[in-house]
Amino acid sequence: MKELICIVCPKGCHLKVDVDKDFAVTGNGCARGVEYAKAELTHPTRVVTSSVCVEGALHRRCPVKTNGAIPKEKIADAMKTLDGVCLKAPVALGAVVVENVCGTGVDFVSTRELEVV
Amino acid sequence: MYDLIVVGGGPAGLAAAYAARQNGAKKIIILERDKELGGILNQCIHNGFGLHRFKEELTGPEYAGRFEKMLESTDVEVSLDTMVLSITPRREVHCVSAEDGYRILEAKAIVLAMGCRERTRGAISIPGTRPAGVFTAGAAQRYVNMEGYMVGKRVVILGSGDIGLIMARRMTLEGAKVLACVEVMPYSGGLNRNIVQCLHDYDIPLYLSHTITDIKGDRRVEQVTVAKVDENRKPIKGSEMIFDCDTILLSVGLIPENELTRGAGIEIDRRTNGAVVYENMETSMDGVFACGNVVHVHDLVDFVSAESERAGAAAAKYALGGEAAGEAIDVKNGDGVSYTVPQKIRIDNVEKACEIFFRVRKIYKDSKIVVKSGETQLASFKREHLAPGEMEHITLPKVLLDKASGEIVVSVEE
């Protein structure tokens, strides 16, 4: 029996997972907890958020995220792909900043609009 | 004359203004001191926002962006770079900006949505020298995420509030070494999910029942001493650990920013440090409403939006001539409960049900939230898990409230 805290939503359910019984989950408040528990114990993934340099905008950084979850062990390498990236305003919401991050098929995209200032 | 003036253009102000417009208020203006709308969400670049409100997981800027787009489709005015100086009982708002100079704006209704600010080192009195390198976690978050400055290389975080946990991960991802997160209480002040995905994921130790007892450093922080504390939160001699670090981030609580509220003579609740509010988020001053973190500090922006939409709708109703009437009963906190919002309910003004938000004083397993009026038990709600770091709420239907007399008391029974 493994104990996990679900991170799918802020509720943070305390899950109990029976690995020997095909990852049977108890303590979950919703179905997403079942999915999370199995993924977390087999191949854990995370959405990564960070920021990149931007020129000509109100701020010097533009926030970005992976538009899907990537394997946890690739987070450090994914962060490296953002080094040296510099956008120019205007930036559209959802603009692709780095394509196919570390071969995951997931892109880093901008998470806000930035107008030219 | 405005129907509604909203003070603050963060998540609370945005939701209140939009809801007021939807509910028939016409001439609305948002006064915002920053150069853009969105407030603190702009620097909260992590995800996890909006699961309740939009049924999807958004980052802070995306969440703010949604509300800004909704507002753009309306005729709500926005005055950026504008500082409100005072609010009078006649609902005049004194404000100043570089573009428009000093203005006195009048309104039929006002929504206070100024949010909160961080407790600082001074507020908690850490001993030691006064070197550079001690930041509140939120200030560091703004430097790193918006202004492009990395604030340090070896970091100790004091306090386990959500901003501190989020910054532990953020600093790690940007190449810093986060040595420890130190929490004086025996439990974390942040959400469980943040302990998992910000500390556990990066093997950052969380020291519960510990605090910083000394800071050393001449120009810059060089070393901190962390000690275990006893049940009275007094450091235990001999339990000290030394960390060599250049940066300390403080995540030691948030304080509602109520200078304007106090200046206007509005009644403040000592438990929340926010205005005392009625069921519709109206304050002790007629036609002045308050919502979001300026009333009580929320865990989730989704709940700020929901509360602010109620405040905005009520403010619109007031501006259109619908004053709330009726006798108010007090909502009191009983055993195990540290505060309630609202603090007063005018039962005649409750349509179907009234939601009560509160926090508990310690961690409870398998307990009951009990609502009583005198000796009469109005309602009881089972809870598997209660924690001070997680805001709780209950919904009291009007039929139950009608049975109350004088006051109602919310408490936890084990």
Image: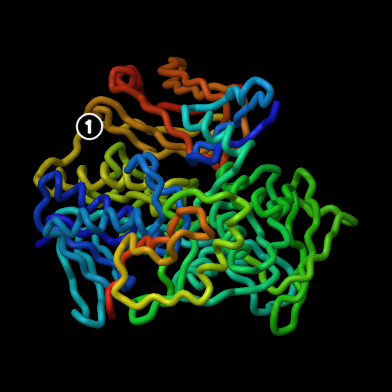
Q: Amino acid at mark 1?
A: Asn
Q: Check the image and name the residue furthest to the front.
A: A103
Return the x and y of residue A98 as percentages of the image width and height.
Answer: 44, 65
Quadrant for the C terminus of chain A in the image: bottom left
| Quadrant of res A86 | bottom left
Return the x and y of residue B224 as percentages of the image width and height.
Answer: 76, 68
Return the x and y of residue B360 as percentages of the image width and height.
Answer: 55, 36
| Quadrant of res B90 | bottom left
Return the x and y of residue B207 as percentages of the image width and height.
Answer: 74, 51
Quadrant for the N terminus of chain A in the image: top right
Disc tally is: 1
Q: Check the image and name the residue furthest to the bottom.
A: B219
Residue A33 visible from this viewpoint: yes
Image side of residue B157 versus residue B149, left or right: right
Q: Check the image and name the residue furthest to the right.
A: B238
Say how the picture is coloured: rainbow
Image side of residue A7 versus residue A89, left or right: right
Residue at 73% of width from left, 62% of height from top?
B179
A30 or B206, nearer to the observer: A30
Residue at 16% of width from left, 41% of height from top?
B323
Residue at 64% of width from left, 55% of height from top?
B159
Q: Tell me: residue B51, above or below residue B126.
A: above
Residue at 49% of width from left, 48% of height from top?
A69
Identify the residue position indicated by label 1 in the image. Answer: B349
Chain of the residue under label 1: B
Residue B8 visible from this viewpoint: no
Disc 1 packing (10 Å; few <14; some 14–19; many ≥20): some
B221 or B253, nearer to the observer: B221
| Quadrant of res B336 | top right
